[in-house]
Image (cartoon, helix red, strand yellow):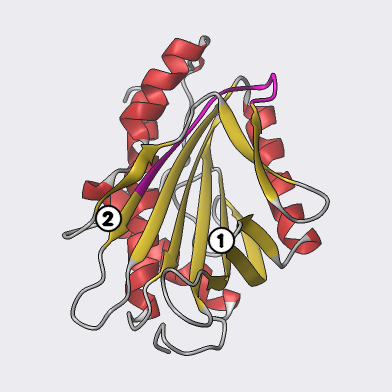
Amino acid sequence: MSASQDASPSVSTAPSASAQAQGDTTGTTAPFHLDPAKVPKTTAAALALARSVAAGPDSFGPGFVARTPAESDPASWPVLGRDCVWQQRALPGDVLVSLTRYSRLPAAGGAGEVHTAATVTVHRTVAQADWEIADTLEQALRCPYQQLRDTERIAGLNSVGSGFGTNGNTSADDYLMEMGSYLNPTLGKGKLPYFWAQARLGPVTVAVAVEGGQGIDQQQLMTTLSQGVASMETKVRVALGVSS
């Protein structure tokens, strides 16, 4: 199904597609073994880790460039309200840093512009990062229609979670996939593809959103998504994993 069609993609196709791209990029099927001594204990150390991990334009393929602004404020993160509207809030006490890098693939050759957002969140403990995953799953059930910004909305959101060893997840402690329709008049008329994936490795979560891309094959957009997540997973493994 092409990205120009109005129908929302089926979430049931997400695990195998994303797992294939993850496997090709990370080259690992081993559980992640965290080295507690390497876990950041301060905001400065967490920010250094986040900046070294967060995917920029080079992680998504040829033609991608930075958006403006290129990075979020690492002292804040988005919170989904009871009204299903996202707003930036100060970090809770259990989060050291949450950094997002914004990239785009300009429209060309009849294909619409693609936006990506890559987020790294460093928690103080594994349990707190695990809670973020659980909360994210609940959000899609509570708010299948979400307001991102004044003119940006997500519709018909579906999600699926996969622990290590399930649904093709062979690289992260936990993996989430969300799919739906994206509505943003600046990128195109009607429904556009929306893909979002999040992985947890120890106390760190990494996530990528892919929005837009009118006229681009959805499998190509899924590959873009998975490449971004996999590149960040690999960097977290190297930074925080037990040395072999």
Camera-nearest residue between 158 and 33 = 158
Marking on residue 177: 1
Magenta run includes residue 92: yes
Helix, strand or loop at disc 1? Answer: strand
Marking on residue 134: none
Camera-nearest residue between 64 and 219 = 64
- The N terminus lies in quadrant: bottom left
Residue 129: percent from left, percent from top? 63, 33
Sequence-wise, the earlier of marks 2 and 1 is 2
The answer to whether residue 163 is left or right of residue 85 is left
Marking on residue 60: 2
Density class for disc 1 (Cα within 10 Å; few <14, some 14-19, many ≥20) is many
- The C terminus lies in quadrant: top left
- State the image quarter where residue 145 is shown: bottom right
- State the image quarter where residue 101 is shown: top left
Name the amino acid, label 1.
Answer: Met
Magenta stretch bounds = 91-102
Helix, strand or loop at disc 2? Answer: loop
Q: Is residue 157 above or below residue 9?
A: above
